[in-house]
Image (tube, rainbow, N blue to C red):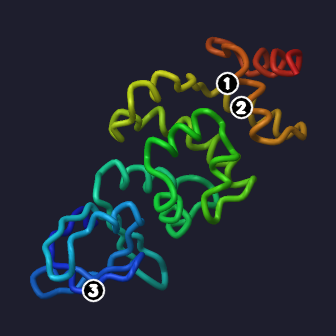
Amino acid sequence: MIGRLTGIIIEKQPPEMVLDVHGVGYEVSAPMSTFVNLPPLNEKVSLYTHLVVREDAQLLYGFATQRERLLFRSLLKVNGVGAKLALTILSGSDVDSFARSVLEGDAASLTRLPGVGKKTADRLIIEMRDRLKEVGSAMGLDDQITTNMPSSSGARKEALEALIALGYKAAEADRMIRSFDAQDMTTEQIIRQALQRN
């Protein structure tokens, strides 16, 4: 795995650039948040990288900060989000704003990002909330953001899946469960409480 590159920028046309590292030119894709902070052509730069190996290609993605790379890697784990969409999300939102939108369940702000529709926004909210809690400190998220993160448990996830199976939209089911303290409750108790409050 290539974790970091330091080299001379010999070409750049968003979202692509070519870095010359000791005579080898690496094609690197980067979000706009990284591109706007790049030095001019023929200047030296260091980027944190993530290598995606596919059957038909090996693609290298570059990031100015470790927190951007960590968010990119977390986004890749979301069902239906590939590297291209993850890069687009990072180009349209900084790490803190994205985390805040996810944790507040703000699907409207997420749908304003290019390539993110209502279903994808709902999926991002549900799947990224727990991941952000796990990697929040590593991402350097504001303390205020991480303290507002709801607790999560296997029972909560099972209840969420059950409510979705009953026909509730993902964001609505998530809102129903977040409306009360579900800590130390069984899956059945969480479902019952959510349905009673609805």
Q: Residue at x 86, y 38 (%)?
A: 168
Q: Residue at x 53, y 37 (%)?
A: 100
User: Left or right: where does residue 32 sit relative to residue 25?
Assistant: right
| Amino acid at circle 1 | Ala
Residue 138 on image: x %, y %: 33, 38
Residue 73 on image: x %, y %: 43, 55
Residue 60 on image: x %, y %: 35, 73
Residue 122 on image: x %, y %: 70, 46
Q: Residues within 10 Å of mark 2 (few under 14, many from 20)?
A: some
| Gap in angstroms between the C-alphas marked 3 and 1 | 51 Å
Q: Residues within 10 Å of mark 1 (few under 14, many from 20)?
A: some
| Amino acid at circle 2 | Glu
Q: Residue at x 37, y 53 (%)?
A: 68
* Quarter-of-image position of residue 194: top right
Camera-nearest residue between 29 and 13 = 13
- Residue behind mark 3: 11
Q: Relative to 183, say whether 2 is above or below.
A: below
Q: Residue at x 39, y 35 (%)?
A: 141
As helix, strand or loop, the secondary structure at mark 3 comes to strand
- Residue behind mark 1: 155
Camera-nearest residue between 97 and 189 = 97
| Amino acid at circle 3 | Glu
Q: Nearer the viewer, mark 3 or mark 1?
A: 3
As helix, strand or loop, the secondary structure at mark 2 comes to helix
Cβ–Cβ under 8 Å for marks 1 and 2: yes
Image quadrant occupied by the N terminus: bottom left
| Gap in angstroms between the C-alphas marked 1 and 2 | 5 Å
- Residue behind mark 2: 158
Image quadrant occupied by the C terminus: top right
User: Left or right: where does residue 113 sit relative to residue 161?
Assistant: left
